[in-house]
Amino acid sequence: MGGTRGMLIVFEGLDRSGKSTQCEKLVQTLRNEGEKVEHMQFPNRTTPIGQMINEYLTGESQQEDHVIHLLFSANRWESAQAIENHIRAGTTVVIDRYSYSGCVYSAAKQNKAMDLEWCRQPEEGLPRPDLCLFLDLSSEEAAKRGGFGTERYEKQDLQARVRELYTEMRQHEDEREDIVVVNAGQSIEEVQCEVLKVVKEARRQLDTQGLELRHMR
Ligand code: TMP
Ligand code: MG
């Protein structure tokens, strides 16, 4: 995989959909091919903002819905420049969750005015992924995979709404272009194979079209 700039690749999906596994496998495969790859995840729980998010998710603290939404977004903004720098330096950045999680999990709370459109606003201006791989799994299947954990959003009714909102979000013109749905109900190897195919195709397109890194709008 050649090209002048790195790609911005994001994995999305419900909790237990296999994102972390597939992220690691893709990072490893690309590195084995000699590509420079940076592996990130959101929330990034290591920063002061990330620690506040972690306490909220584990139930140690409470946050008003709008406040935690903006903290999740701020947690991406604090890494935005680093992501751009990597990409311009030719390093591909693979991220476990991004703005899409930011929108659908907050909107799933059904706190009246916090619809997808409201939730998307603070994301505008962030680096726009070249590709978002949505690992699609029903909330029932996700629950069967050893059950959800104990973190705040790991409940089946919320996960079911999250999945519907991921579908709704694909109606936005940019998201429709960026998101590729992968059936996460297949074996790890099958998903890995499909993911790689989609990534290679995206790289080919980028190389032929010579696209600059874009921003969320
Ligand atoms: P994780 O399980 O990938 O560490 O993510 C923790 C939870 O945070 C997960 O349930 C999804 C949720 N989340 C948001 O609500 N907003 C966000 O912006 C992100 C990145 C994650
Ligand atoms: Mg989780």
Image (spheres, rainbow, N blue to C red):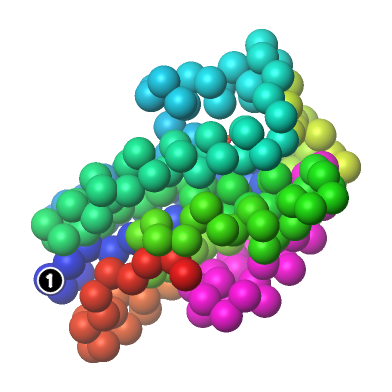
The residue that disc 1 covers is 4
Task: Name the main secondary structure of what is drawn in magenta.
Answer: helix
Q: Is residue 125 above or below residue 211?
A: above
Residue 67 sits in which quadrant? top right
In the figure, 51 relative to 25: above or below?
above
Q: Position of residue 180 (x, y in %)?
A: 54, 71
Question: Residue 62 location in percent, x, y?
Answer: 70, 19
Q: Can the viewer see residue 146 in this picture?
A: no
Quadrant including the N terminus: bottom left
Q: What secondary structure is marked by label 1?
A: loop
Q: Amino acid at mark 1?
A: Thr
Q: Residue at x 68, y 52 (%)?
A: 104
Q: Position of residue 102 (x, y in %)?
A: 59, 48
Residue sitting at x 72%, y 35%: 65
Query: Furthest residue to the top?
Result: 60
Can residue 182 be seen here? yes
Residue 189 magenta-drawn? Answer: no
For the residue pair 90 and 174, the one nearer the viewer reads as 174
Front-most of residues 97 and 48 = 48
Kindly indicate the quadrant of the structure image that contains residue 154: top right
Q: Residue 30: percent from the left, percent from the top? A: 26, 56
Q: Is residue 22 left or right of residue 5?
A: right
